[in-house]
Image (cartoon, grey):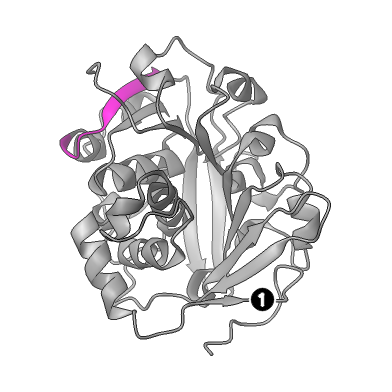
Amino acid sequence: MSGRRIDVLHVGSASRDLTPDDPRGWRLGGGVTYAALTTARLGLRTAAYIGVDEPAASAHELTLLADAGVDLMLARLPESPVFDNQERPGGRVQVCHVVGAPLAVPLLPSSWTAARAWSLVPVAGEVGDEWARVIPDDVLVAVGWQGFLRDLAAGREVGRRAPGPSAVVGRGDLVGVSQQDLEPGTRLATLATFLRPGADLLVTQGSRGGLLVVAGGDGPPEVLRYLPTATDREVDPTGAGDTFLAALLASVLRPAIVGRTRARRRPDLRFAAAAGSLAVEGPGLTGVPDRAAVLVRRARERVRRVVVPSETSQVGTGGLDPD
């Protein structure tokens, strides 16, 4: 662990995702691992505080993060989440085998707490509201909301938990959630009431792209649709949304990474969509791309009109119009 200046600090627990394709019977997952590897490979100075159980603590995937330049601190937990992600004709179904334990706030290095951005990306609600109280007031905060919206019980399919007030979500400047973790018909205006005024809400919709919602305080939220970026092949969809959100955060934190002429500190949906499309092309964390690959993929999509205003008022409605 170094004392270098950190751009972004990621917090959350790793999960172990069951798979027959690995000799261990599982791969390391969880939003924090995908997010940390993404920002590091995009060129940001990255640190990560990751909750792990005993098997995950020695996972070879942690070497991927270290080799990419991530400063790591592991929190040894009595258990961390274990999931079976099943791809069925009607979509993905998750079965929870182990729920995991809460992730307490530790004494972090001063260089980490002074990071320009914090990214709170729980996989099973392990990041409690006490984390919101230790974040400095002047930093950019990204939140993986979907990690708070899972109803978990060992041996059962993962259910949906209705969104509600949360100090962590309310602190977020950029909040991401998957449509899969929301009840169909959930109103965007309702989701926006849980965010701070001016915050950006990303609602990913898998192969249909998604929505970027700007919480407007007293007024109606502004909604943009973004179209999906085409993939060459889909090997493993796990982590695509976490990669997308981390790339979106990177585009705000350091606009120059998406192009030399760009100076606006606004989320770049095309850049993030390109990163997310690449993430599904390899198993587990091996699919997380570097900046060069993302720029090439984004350039391939440049001829398409990929971001358009939307009058959508709720999730779970219709497909995205490519024109």
Can residue 200 be spotted in the picture? yes
**How busy is the neighbourhood of tag 1: few (under 14 within 10 Å), some, or many (20 plus)?**
some
The residue positioned 35% from the left and 53% from the top of the image is 19
* In this rendering, position of residue 248 left or right of residue 44: right
Residue 156, percent across and down?
Answer: 63, 47
The residue positioned 24% from the left and 47% from the top of the image is 41
Query: For the magenta stretch, what is the residue range?
Result: 67-75
The residue positioned 46% from the left and 78% from the top of the image is 306
Q: Nearer the viewer, residue 277 or 310?
A: 310
Query: In the rendered structure, does residue 94 fall within the stretch colored magenta?
Result: no
Residue 65, percent across and down?
Answer: 24, 37
Can residue 122 be spotted in the picture? no
* In this rendering, position of residue 13 left or right of residue 299: right
Does residue 301 sit above or below 114 in this rendering? below
Q: So how many labels did they put on this image? A: 1
Query: In the rendered structure, does residue 72 fall within the stretch colored magenta?
Result: yes
